[in-house]
C-alpha cells in the first residue's frame, strides 16, 4: 500500500493525452449546446484536430517518462506510446475525411467530433492499461462512443441497423470479457496483469486449471469479437457496410488496433505462462479468420463490404503473429497494425470521396473509369490496394513480411505457408478494383465526380505517403517496435 | 555511386519525372520517354568497359549500402558476365518499345510511358540485385507495370489476361518469399555473396529434405515465369492481349527473369537438389519444346503463334541449364539473349502488321510482300533467325545447348532437335500465308511499307541478329567465365555428397515428417 494516494506530477503527465481528449470532447459538447441550431462544424472540427495533435504531443512527451501511474493501474511504455499515437493518427485522419461527409449528409457535426474524441480516449486508456478493470473501462468508453458513431445518421436505416447490431453483439462480447475478468479475479485474487502472471507462475494451478482455462477462454471470446477474428467476425461486414464511410474507416483501424494492443499485452504478460495452452486456439482462429475473410471477400460487389471482409482477413494475419507469442511477433503486430491503419483509412477515404450524398455509389463497379476521371485519386487508391496485396516498397508488404517471418522463426511453417497462399488469393479481389478503375470505361458514377475536398485530400496524401515511407524505410517503425515489445514481466 | 547505380536509378528518376509532366501534349511525353530510355541505353553501354578485354572474376560496379536494419537488408547491386547482357537487353528494348507505341498508344499516353519506365527499373533491378530480399522486391515490382500495360492498353480479353498473369506470378512468388525467409533464418543474411561463401565454407548447410523444398519453392516461381510446360498457360493469353510494347517487354525480358533466376539461384544455392531433379525438369523442358512447336503450328492468331514459339524456345534454355555442362549453360544464356532479340523483333513486326490492318488473324493476310517488300524482308530475316539458320543468332544458342545435352543424354538431344525442325515448319508456313500468295484487298486499311520510325525500331534488332550470329565471341567470353564458376561450384557440392540417393516419394514423406516434428 502506498503511503499517499495522491498521484505525483509525472503520473498526470502519463495520463495527459486522455485528459486533453476528454476536456476538449466535453468542451465541444458544451459549444454545441450553446450554439443552438447553427451548425458549428468547422469550429468543432478544428478544435478536435487541435486536441488530437496536442494529445499526440502529450503521448510522445509521456513516452519520454515511462513508468506506472495511478497505483500501477496504467503503464506508459514504448508499447503504450506506440498504440496511443497510432489510434490518435487514425482519429486525426478520420476527422479530416469527415468534414466533407458531414456537410454532404447535412448532419449536425459537433457531437460527431466529440464522439470521436471520446472513443479515442478509450483506446488510449486501453493502450496504456496495466490491469483488467482499466482495460474494461477503456474498452467500454471506446465501444459505446463507437456504437453511437455507427448509427450517427439517425434517419438512415442502414446506419440504424449497423448501430443496433454492433451494440447488441458488442455488449455480449464485453460481457464475456467482464465475466472472464471475474473468474480470473476469483482464481488469482488480482486484476493486475503482472500479478496475475506471478500468480499463475507461482501457485499450484493444477487444481484451478479449469477455472483459469475458462477465464482465458471467456476473455479470448471478447477479444476475438473486438478484433473481428473468426468465429466471432459475423458482425463486421454488416456494421462496416451500414455505418457512415468515415466511421467504418475509424472502426476498422482505431478500435481494432487498440483491441489488438490489449490482446497482445494480456496474453504476452498475464497469460504468458499458459502460452502453450492458448497458442493452438490462436493458431486455429488465425487460419480460420484468414480463410473466411479472403474467400468471402472474393465474391463481394459492395466495396465497403469487401473492405470489411478484407479487414477480417487482415486480422487473421495479425493473429498469426500473436500465435507465435514471441517478441518479434509482437513487433510484427505493431508494424502491421500501423501499416494496415494507413492503407485502410486511405481506402475508406477514397470510398468516402466517391460515394456521394447518401452513399449512392458504393458498388465496386461504380468505380469504373476513375483513373480517367481523376488519375491522382486513382493513383493514390492504387498505392493502398498494392499495399493490401503486399507488393514490395509498400507498408503492407513489410507488414506481411515481418508477420510471416515471425511465424517461420517460431516454427509455424505451415501457418506461414497457408498465410502466404491466402495472401495470393487476396490479391484477386484487390486487383479487381484496379481492373475496374483502370480498365473499364467511365460509367455514370464517375460522370459528376467533384474534385477532392481538402480534408479528404490531406488524409489521402498523408496515408499514401505514410504507406510508401513505411514501405521503403520500415526500420523507422520496426526498430521502435522491437525495442518496445519487452514487456515488464 | 557506380555507373551501374546510375543505369538502375535513371529509369526510376525518369518515371518520377514523367508522373509530374503535363498531360496535355502526348508527343512531348513520347519524346521524353524515348530520350530518357536512350540515355539509359547509352549509359548502360559503358558497363561493357570492364568486360572488354578480359573477363573479370567476381563482381564489378559493386555497391553495398545498408537499407533496412532489421532484418538486415542491404542495397547490394553488382554486375557480372551473366547479368551484363541481360541489363543491356533490357535497356536496348525499352526505347524500341517506346518507338513501336508511337502511334499504337493514343489513350492515357502519360500513364503508359510511366509504366514502361517503371518496368525498365524493375527489370534492371532483378538482374543486378545481390541481396535475396532486394531481388524479391524488384521481382514483384515488375509485376505491377506489366499488369497495367496488359490490362489497360490490351485487346478485347485484356482484363482476363492481366488478372491471370498477375495471379499466376503472385502464387509462384509467395512460396519463393517463404523460402527466402527460411534461408535468412538459417544464414542470418539475405546477401547472396555471403550466403554463397557460407555454403562453400560449410557454415551454412541445408539437409537434403530442406534443400529439396527450398529448391522447389524457388523453382516453382521461376518455372511459372519462364514459363515451363505445364505452367505456361498464362503466357499465350498475356501475349495475345498485350499491346505490342507489352509483348516485346514480356517476351524479350520478363521471361528471362525466370531463366536467369534458375541459373543464378536454383542451380547455385541448391546444387544437390538441382542435380537430383534435373531429370524430370529436362523432360518437362523437352515436352515444352515439342508441345510449344506443335501448338504454334496450328494457331490462327499470329501473336499466339509467336507466344507458343516462345514456350518452345525457352524450353531450350531450361534444358541447357539442367544439362549441367559448360556448353549447355553457355547455350542457355546465349539463347536467352537470342530469344530476346528475335522474338522481340517478331512481336514488333506483328505489331506493325496489326497497326496496318487491325487484325492478328493469319487468314486476314496474304501477299503482303507485294505492297510492303521491305517489311517482308525484315520479317524474313527475323523468321530465319528464329528458326536457327546458321550465321544468325539463334543457331549458336541452340547448337550449344544441343551439344551440351548430347554429352549427357543423346535421347534428349534428338527430341529437342525435333523442336528445331518443327520451328522451321510453323515459321515458314506463317511466312508463306502472310507474305506470299494472293494479295488480300484491304480497302479500309491500305498496306504500306516500313516508315522511318519503324525502321529505327527494327534496325537495331536486325543488326544484333547478324552480329550475334557471326561474332558470338564478342558476347560469350564473360558469360562462359561466370558459367564455369557456377558449374565448378555445382560439381564441388556433388563430390561432397556422400549420402545415398533417396527416391522421390520417400523424400517427400520424410520431409513431411520433419515439418511436423519441427512444429
Image (tube, rainbow, N blue to C red):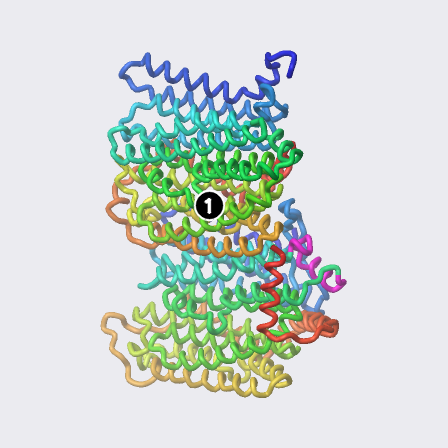
Instruction: Report the residue that reaches farthest toward the front.
Output: A207
The C terminus of chain A: image quadrant: top right
Q: Is residue A163 above or below residue B378?
A: above
Residue range (magenta): B184-202
State whether residue B474 appears in this view: no
Query: Percent x, y for residue B52?
Result: 67, 68
Q: Is residue A355 left or right of residue B387?
A: left
Mark 1 sits on what residue? A314
Q: Quadrant of residue A25?
A: top left
Q: Residue at x 67, y 34 (%)?
A: A202
Q: Is residue A230 above or below residue B451?
A: above
Query: Percent x, y for residue A19?
Result: 50, 18
Query: Foreground: A381 or B40?
Result: A381
Query: Foreground: A11 or A140?
Result: A140
SS class, disc 1: helix
Query: Foreground: A378 or A35?
Result: A35
Q: Is residue B196 magenta?
A: yes
Q: Is residue A60 above or below residue B221?
A: above
Magenta stretch: dominant SS?
helix
Amino acid at each position: 500500500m502506498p503511503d499517499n494516494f495522491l498521484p505525483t506530477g509525472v503520473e498526470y503527465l502519463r495520463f495527459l493525452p486522455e485528459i486533453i481528449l476528454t476536456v476538449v470532447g466535453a468542451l465541444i459538447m458544451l459549444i454545441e449546446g450553446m450554439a443552438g441550431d447553427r451548425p458549428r462544424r468547422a469550429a468543432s472540427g478544428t478544435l478536435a484536430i487541435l486536441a488530437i495533435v496536442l494529445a499526440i504531443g502529450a503521448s510522445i512527451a509521456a513516452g519520454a517518462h515511462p513508468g506506472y501511474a495511478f497505483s500501477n493501474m496504467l503503464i506508459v511504455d514504448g508499447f503504450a506510446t506506440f498504440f496511443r499515437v497510432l489510434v490518435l493518427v487514425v482519429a486525426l485522419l478520420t476527422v479530416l475525411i469527415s468534414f466533407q461527409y458531414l456537410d454532404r449528409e447535412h448532419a449536425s457535426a459537433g457531437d460527431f467530433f466529440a464522439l470521436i474524441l471520446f472513443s479515442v480516449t478509450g483506446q488510449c486508456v486501453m493502450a496504456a492499461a496495466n490491469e483488467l478493470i482499466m482495460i474494461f473501462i477503456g474498452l467500454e468508453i471506446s465501444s459505446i462512443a463507437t456504437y453511437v458513431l455507427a448509427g450517427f445518421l439517425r434517419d438512415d436505416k442502414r446506419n440504424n441497423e449497423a448501430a443496433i447490431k454492433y451494440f447488441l453483439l458488442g455488449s455480449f462480447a464485453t460481457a464475456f470479457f467482464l465475466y472472464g475478468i471475474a473468474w480470473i479475479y476469483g482464481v488469482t485474487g488480482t486484476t493486475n496483469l503482472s500479478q496475475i502472471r506471478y500468480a499463475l507462475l507461482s501457485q499450484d494451478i493444477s487444481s484451478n486449471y479449469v477455472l483459469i482455462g475458462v477465464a482465458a477462454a471467456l476473455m479470448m471470446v471478447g477479444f476475438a469479437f473486438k478484433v473481428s477474428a473468426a468465429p466471432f467476425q459475423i458482425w463486421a461486414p454488416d456494421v462496416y457496410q451500414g455505418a457512415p464511410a468515415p466511421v467504418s474507416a475509424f472502426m476498422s483501424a482505431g478500435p481494432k488496433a487498440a483491441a489488438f494492443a490489449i490482446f497482445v499485452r494480456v496474453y504476452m504478460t498475464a497469460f504468458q505462462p499458459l502460452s502453450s495452452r492458448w497458442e493452438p486456439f490462436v493458431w486455429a482462429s488465425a487460419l480460420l479468420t484468414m480463410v473466411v475473410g479472403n474467400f468471402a471477400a472474393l465474391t463481394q460487389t459492395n466495396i465497403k463490404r469487401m473492405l470489411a471482409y478484407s479487414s477480417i482477413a487482415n486480422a487473421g494475419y495479425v493473429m498469426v503473429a500473436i500465435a507465435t507469442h514471441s517478441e518479434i511477433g509482437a513487433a510484427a503486430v505493431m508494424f502491421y497494425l500501423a501499416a494496415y491503419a494507413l492503407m485502410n483509412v486511405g481506402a475508406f477515404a477514397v470510398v468516402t470521396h466517391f460515394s456521394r450524398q447518401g452513399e449512392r455509389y458504393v458498388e465496386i463497379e461504380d468505380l469504373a473509369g476513375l483513373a480517367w476521371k481523376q488519375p491522382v485519386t486513382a493513383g493514390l487508391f492504387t498505392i493502398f490496394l498494392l499495399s493490401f496485396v503486399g507488393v514490395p516498397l509498400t507498408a503492407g508488404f513489410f507488414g506481411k513480411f515481418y508477420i510471416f517471418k515471425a511465424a517461420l522463426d517460431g516454427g509455424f511453417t505451415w501457418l506461414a505457408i497457408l498465410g502466404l497462399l491466402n495472401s495470393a488469393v487476396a490479391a484477386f479481389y484487390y486487383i479487381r478494383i484496379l481492373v475496374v478503375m483502370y480498365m473499364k470505361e467511365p460509367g455514370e458514377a464517375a460522370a459528376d465526380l467533384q474534385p477532392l475536398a481538402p480534408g479528404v485530400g490531406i488524409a489521402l496524401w498523408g496515408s499514401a505517403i505514410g504507406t510508401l515511407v513505411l514501405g521503403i524505410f520500415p526500420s523507422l517503425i520496426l526498430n521502435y517496435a522491437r525495442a518496445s515489445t519487452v514487456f515488464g514481466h | 555511386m557506380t555507373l551501374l547505380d546510375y543505369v538502375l536509378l535513371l529509369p526510376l528518376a525518369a518515371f518520377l519525372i514523367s508522373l509530374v509532366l503535363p498531360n496535355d501534349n502526348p508527343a512531348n511525353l513520347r519524346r521524353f520517354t524515348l530520350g530518357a530510355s536512350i540515355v539509359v541505353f547509352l549509359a548502360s553501354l559503358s558497363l561493357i568497359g570492364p568486360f572488354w578485354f578480359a573477363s573479370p572474376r567476381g563482381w564489378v560496379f559493386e555497391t553495398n549500402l545498408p537499407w533496412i536494419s532489421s532484418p538486415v537488408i542491404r542495397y547490394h547491386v553488382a554486375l557480372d558476365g551473366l547479368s551484363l547482357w541481360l541489363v543491356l537487353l533490357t535497356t536496348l528494348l525499352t526505347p524500341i518499345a517506346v518507338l513501336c507505341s508511337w502511334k499504337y498508344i493514343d489513350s492515357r499516353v502519360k500513364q503508359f510511358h510511366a509504366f514502361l519506365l517503371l518496368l525498365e527499373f524493375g527489370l534492371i533491378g532483378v538482374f543486378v540485385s545481390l541481396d535475396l530480399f532486394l531481388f524479391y522486391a524488384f521481382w514483384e515490382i515488375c509485376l505491377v507495370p506489366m499488369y497495367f500495360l496488359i490490362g489497360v492498353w490490351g485487346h478485347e480479353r485484356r482484363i482476363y489476361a492481366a488478372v491471370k498473369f498477375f495471379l499466376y506470378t503472385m502464387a509462384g512468388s509467395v512460396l519463393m518469399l517463404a523460402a527466402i525467409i527460411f534461408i535468412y533464418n538459417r544464414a542470418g543474411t539475405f546477401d547472396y555473396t555471403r550466403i554463397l561463401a557460407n555454403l562453400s565454407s560449410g557454415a551454412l548447410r541445408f539437409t537434403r529434405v530442406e534443400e529439396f523444398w527450398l529448391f522447389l519453392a524457388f523453382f516453382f516461381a521461376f518455372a511459372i515465369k519462364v514459363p515451363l510446360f505445364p505452367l505456361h498457360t498464362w503466357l499465350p493469353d498475356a501475349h495475345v492481349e498485350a499491346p505490342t510494347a507489352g509483348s516485346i517487354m514480356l517476351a524479350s525480358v520478363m521471361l528471362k527473369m525466370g531463366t536467369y533466376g534458375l541459373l543464378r539461384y536454383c542451380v547455385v544455392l541448391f546444387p544437390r537438389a538441382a542435380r537430383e531433379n534435373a531429370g524430370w525438369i529436362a523432360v518437362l523442358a523437352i515436352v515444352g519444346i515439342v508441345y510449344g512447336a506443335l501448338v504454334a503450328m496450328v494457331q490462327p492468331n499470329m501473336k499466339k503463334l509467336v507466344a507458343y514459339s516462345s514456350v518452345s524456345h525457352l524450353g531450350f534454355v531450361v534444358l541447357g541449364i539442367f544439362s549441367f555442362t559448360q556448353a549447355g549453360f553457355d547455350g542457355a544464356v546465349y539463347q536467352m539473349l537470342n530469344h530476346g532479340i528475335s522474338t522481340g523483333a517478331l512481336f514488333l513486326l506483328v505489331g506493325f502488321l496489326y497497326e496496318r490492318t487491325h487484325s492478328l488473324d493469319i487468314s486476314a493476310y496474304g501477299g503482303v510482300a507485294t505492297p510492303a517488300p521491305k517489311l517482308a524482308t525484315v520479317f524474313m530475316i527475323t523468321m530465319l533467325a528464329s528458326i536457327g539458320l546458321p550465321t544468325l543468332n539463334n543457331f549458336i544458342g541452340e547448337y550449344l545447348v544441343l551439344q551440351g545435352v548430347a554429352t549427357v543424354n543423346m535421347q534428349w538431344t534428338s527430341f529437342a532437335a525435333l523442336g528445331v525442325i518443327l520451328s522451321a515448319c510453323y515459321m515458314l508456313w506463317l511466312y508463306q500465308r502472310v507474305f506470299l500468295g494472293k494479295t488480300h484487298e484491304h480497302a479500309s486499311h491500305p498496306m504500306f511499307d516500313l516508315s522511318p520510325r519503324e525502321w529505327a525500331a527494327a534496325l537495331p534488332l536486325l543488326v544484333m541478329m547478324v552480329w550475334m550470329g557471326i561474332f558470338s565471341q564478342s558476347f560469350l567470353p564473360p558469360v562462359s567465365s561466370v558459367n564455369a564458376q557456377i558449374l565448378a561450384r555445382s560439381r564441388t557440392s556433388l563430390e561432397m555428397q556422400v549420402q545415398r540417393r533417396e527416391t522421390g516419394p520417400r523424400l517427400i514423406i520424410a520431409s513431411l515428417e520433419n515439418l511436423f516434428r519441427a512444429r
